[in-house]
Amino acid sequence: MDLDGFREDGSFTRLYKKRVANNQDLVILISDHQNRRGTGKSVLSLKIAQKLDRTEEGLTKDKVSISVDELLDAYVEQPKGSALVLDEAEAGLSKYEAGTSVNKAMRELISMGRVLNKTLLLNLPSSGELDRDLKALCDWWFLVKQKGIAQGHFLAWNPYSEEPRTPKKKELEWSDIDEGTHLRNVYDYLHKKKMQHLRGDSEESSQRLKPSEVQEKIEKVKKNVRNETRNDVLTQLYRNTDLTQQDVADAIGLSRGRIANIVSDS
């Protein structure tokens, strides 16, 4: 990938590898230092997502969203190791809407979803617009200085301030997405959705989820998290002990065939 600065020994790469090794999510914030649009944040988001997605199918259209509603669905439906993009994420994540059901759902998603080993990229014009509690849950921040150049920051909890500490790391450089590539197709799809949303002729423009519907989506995420955690425990129990699959099945109350599927999928 032509993202200059993604060194194997770099701070960001070390953080990413640590999260993968610990089976945890990674949350990345991308914004512009002058709150501008059109500075290549979408391209940067997609290139990073393509680089970090570890699934067999890679980054697909189903993994890019323009609303929290879509992101919640993708988080549940996309496999472990996926990279998910929420583009122009100020829609519904503003600090001025901190009490909304969507904002609460997003905070809950990030805070509890640390075991599914997915990467979330939140792309918005200004980091200052993001709900404070949500920002505190982010791990890394790319601040776009000009088109093609972003300053990397590690986001660290600061007990003496409402804002996290943001020590500077290496700059990241990127170029446009080549025409005729799979990633260009994903970008074109995302751009079309954003334009439809701005014109008001998309489903996201005319429909907002009710609090009960948002909570239903969160419950699906919780169930997914519980199942993933259970599956990891059962797999480690089977692989690291002398117990047979039938022993594990009898102890947990599942069929031996279900245990076999869990172990083979892990």
Image (cartoon, rainbow, N blue to C red):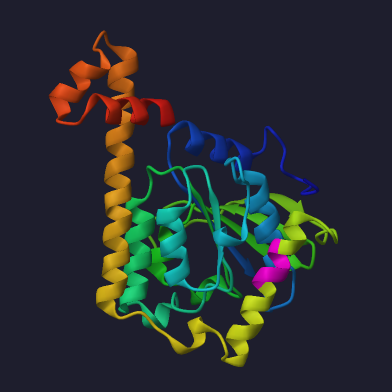
Residue 162 seen: no
Q: Is residue 47 left or right of residue 199?
A: right
Q: Which residues are magenta?
A: 186-190
Identify whether 213 is placed above or below 23.
Answer: below
Q: Residue furthest top?
A: 242
Residue 241 visible in this rendered orientation of the protein: yes
Query: Based on the displayed image, in which of its 4 quarters is residue 122 positioned?
Result: bottom right
Residue 225 on image: x %, y %: 32, 47
Residue at the image position 29 percent from the left and 42 percent from the top: 227
Please tell me which residue lies in front, 240 or 148: 240
* Residue at point 55%, 40% (across, down): 15
Q: Residue 187 magenta-drawn?
A: yes
**Residue 77 image position (x, y, % from top left):** 43, 54
The image quarter in which residue 265 lies: top left
Q: Position of residue 159 (x, y in %)?
A: 35, 55
- Nearer to me, 189 or 1: 189
Quadrant where the N terminus sits is top right
Q: Main secondary structure of the magenta part?
A: helix
Residue 97 vertical position relative to residue 139 in the rendered view, above or below: below
Q: Residue furthest right?
A: 179
Q: Is residue 55 magenta?
A: no
Q: Is residue 51 left or right of residue 215?
A: right
- Image height check: is 242 above or below 186? above
Please tell me which residue lies in front, 258 or 68: 258
Q: Give the residue drawn at x 71%, y 65%.
A: 187
Q: Quadrant of the C terminus?
A: top left
How many labels were placed on the picture? 0
